[in-house]
Amino acid sequence: MDISGPNPELLDRFAAIVGKNHVLRDANDLAPHLVEGRGLYKGSSPMLLKPGSVEEVSAILKLASETGTPIVPQTGNTGLVGGQTPRTGGSDLIVSLERMNRIRDVDPVANVLVADGGAILADVQKAAEAVDRLFPLSLGSEGSCRIGGNLSTNAGGTAVLAYGNTRQLCLGLEVVLPTGEIWDGLRRLKKDNTGYDLRDLFIGAEGTLGIITGAVLKLFPQPVGHQVALAGLNSPADALKLFERASNLCGTALTGFELMPRIGIEFVARHIEGVRDPLSEPHPWYALIDISTSDSAETANSMVQSLLEQGFEAGLIRDAVIASSVAQQKALWHMRESMSDAQKPEGGSIKHDVSVPVSKIPSFMAEAEQAVLAAMPGARVCAFGHLGDGNIHYNISQPTSADMAADKAAFIGRWREINAIVHGIVLAAGGSISAEHGIGQLKRDELAHIRSPIEMDLMRRIKQAFDPAGIMNPGKVVIIP
Amino acid sequence: MDISGPNPELLDRFAAIVGKNHVLRDANDLAPHLVEGRGLYKGSSPMLLKPGSVEEVSAILKLASETGTPIVPQTGNTGLVGGQTPRTGGSDLIVSLERMNRIRDVDPVANVLVADGGAILADVQKAAEAVDRLFPLSLGSEGSCRIGGNLSTNAGGTAVLAYGNTRQLCLGLEVVLPTGEIWDGLRRLKKDNTGYDLRDLFIGAEGTLGIITGAVLKLFPQPVGHQVALAGLNSPADALKLFERASNLCGTALTGFELMPRIGIEFVARHIEGVRDPLSEPHPWYALIDISTSDSAETANSMVQSLLEQGFEAGLIRDAVIASSVAQQKALWHMRESMSDAQKPEGGSIKHDVSVPVSKIPSFMAEAEQAVLAAMPGARVCAFGHLGDGNIHYNISQPTSADMAADKAAFIGRWREINAIVHGIVLAAGGSISAEHGIGQLKRDELAHIRSPIEMDLMRRIKQAFDPAGIMNPGKVVIIP
């Protein structure tokens, strides 16, 4: 890495492309763009550029390729693996899409919406709602994350069960290649078998193959009926059985099936304002069940009723509550969505974003807990997540101790060790070490370790074919030797 | 192209890999493998190899890469663009996966099925049914087409509206690369964000980047309710309005919405045994509506009833019939599925497999008909297809004449001219010239013409990165200069 960085004259040439009002060079201004949310990575950069058009992005990347200047694309800066963070001690230039935040077009008949890469997810959701349509991507960070980043990380979220990941919600892309060339793939077609699937190659590439500046997104009819229930259960095995019944009973009307442990309910009840446990007795595990129907509200209600009846009869459910208002539906979801935040006052948290085949969730949960507790007695496993997708946020809160603050650093220092234990069990079950957050810097070396040489080689061949100058988000996902 | 071909000694080395009982070298044995269904392409080949394992496929491709021997992968030989046909006058070796036809595993809890690349689609469907699950891919050729070919062409079919193309039905792949290396990407995960999306690059690559030898496929719950209706309509514009209502009313329960013209109904009534027009009066257009529900059979019935009532009230439907038995449901679908065959006795047919944004179907149909009739007075447009996907099989039967047989050749001779007219209108509407059949040989040169230079260049870079020796299905999709 060239730590001397671009010379001032070259920086001025980059700045001239966007105009000096759209450049950050002051250390204080740059600071928030140099760290990612958890503080795991802190990078360095001499300059952040805010292009206002696809042509300006193109000019930046063309100059970068010609001069060998490394570029980090950044949208909402909400990623969790350091993919959007410049390298530590480096001089990567940051290209922020925050000015390119328009909704370009909304077509409720064709059910498509075209957005700039810098459009905020919540704005896309609102634009869809305004024409009585649903854009189903939903994340905790939806008020600040942006579509280009959602696509580049193939973001997941809470609606994947029914609607798929971001990949499944995209019909076409506009991408500026590392060379500055613009690929106009803004197609609006459901069916188009004309050549290699470039779209899906850019989706999930974490900005290492180009910058996504525009996207055609799929819209859906707004559900007519919606109902949410919370069930207290004995075990993940019972949760899986209940999920199978829900899946058979509701088909695609099953829009969420989230698993939560007792400790997670305790954390949110203790730390999140306004949250209380809606069930009268404690239960070892909980399932949050979300059903959306296209025909009528009654169908959603009767589906939930039938499912809970089946669950009680089969001895799978200990107790349950059905939301009696929209406010209660939101309150039940708020418990689930606050679970990560509720861990913060409990001290350090070592996190995993893993997936296994759905049928292996119970055995994975049992094996992982046993192994983690053997390595770290007293660790408080708060594993929750999208059971229906096989995706568990396997979070571990530090053991309670006399001096939580003092022990936090030592606990966090064991991040890689605990990761290795959990990931080993995940991989043995045919799982993924990154279900929805991506690779970035955090899992880059681990990826190279767990994937076959041929798979890593194919990725490097693609990277070199698309980015011969090696300027696009270097140090992320794959390293070119 | 080296028309001298591999020498006999090299052919023997290839044959030794699979054993002489699994090699075709006789011209009569080879003949059926050298032509595609419509007879548009007739290729030549000295030998067909039937490997029995992934390792044998690997050994064949390794030897091919080392010796520069071109290879054409072939599964069911049902493709419609010459992608599976060896080049005319060439000496490509054919690798058939017909012996690799096993269902490797079925897991109804995880809703996955693992199949060899040579597994016949109907066998996959049956294996899913045997565990009360649905594999929704459904094509006219399902009794003979094979999964590796379905994936390589990203096949569409009649269930795309609810379940997506083959791409959306696949979780993981096993691929033998042109170099003979084996990529084991047989993952069973719904969520896995670990590096570039290699899976989707191989899907739809028409065997030019490697041979798909295995796949993990998604299964779905069997629908509980199912109902089919046929409605007589005035125009494609009314069909689109009815589709919008159906989409809003039924959501994902709408599993089919097919458009058919009067002439198509006449063709099937005239030429397909047992088919009769179920409506008492003729109508200019027809919509076949298919609804599948997960909760109960009554829901499917009441949805169809409601939709037809809405359609009558809004003046969109002239007359309609709801199937009163499973046999009648099948009979209605049989009309639609026989429409291509019913054109054959009517003389030559110039075909198009196009898509446009769904909202543009009416204007496309009007413009295309006007342009085709201007170029060829008397041509009989029999345009039908998957309205809900924006995918129309824009077929044109030759004008009736005193000597249909004599005029057929002259008519077919205008294939490219008529293609150019229809494709021009499609492209102006932001559409695709190959919605579901792929590029193969038939549309290869046209693709290079309609795509931007940067898009073609990216495809060539990928091709060269994956197949440096240029041996995989050469002459298809993209040409390396």
Image (tube, coloured by chain):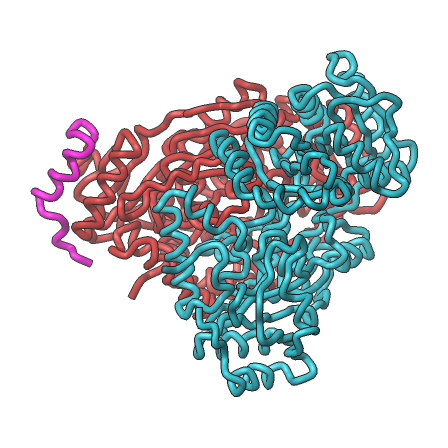
Chain colours: A cyan, B red
Q: How many marks?
A: 0
Q: Is residue B446 above or below residue B162?
A: below
User: Which residue is depicted at the point 86% across and 39% down?
Assistant: A331
Residue located 27% across and 39% down the image: B58
Residue at 72% across / 68% down in the picture?
A: A102
The reply to whether residue B400 is in sight is no
Judged from this view, the residue extending furthest toward the bottom is: A9
State left or right for residue B207 relative to residue B44. Answer: right
Please provide percent x and percent y for residue A95. 60, 71
Residue at 32% x, 31% y: name it: B98
Q: Quadrant of the N terminus of chain A?
A: bottom left
**Relative to residue A296, is residue B481 drawn left or right?**
left
x and y percentages locating residue B273 in the rendered image: 51, 28
> Residue B400: where, in percent of width, then height?
48, 51
The residue sitting at the left extreme is: B9
Q: Nearer the viewer, residue A99 or A402?
A: A402
Foreground of the two, A276 or B299: A276
Q: Position of residue B282 (x, y in %)?
A: 68, 41
Q: Is residue B7 magenta-colored?
A: yes
Q: Is residue B32 above or below residue A111?
A: above
Question: Front-most of B448 and A160?
Answer: A160
Q: Eyeballing the image, is B241 above or below B375? A: above
Q: Is residue B281 left or right of residue B430?
A: right
Q: Quarter-wise, where is residue A340 in the image? A: top right
Res B311 quadrant in image:
top right
- For the C terminus of chain A, the image quarter is bottom left
Residue B174's image quarter? top left
- Magenta highlight range: B1-22
Image side of residue A396 versus residue B445, left or right? right
Asked whether the viewer can see residue B237, the reply is yes
Q: Main secondary structure of the magenta part?
A: helix
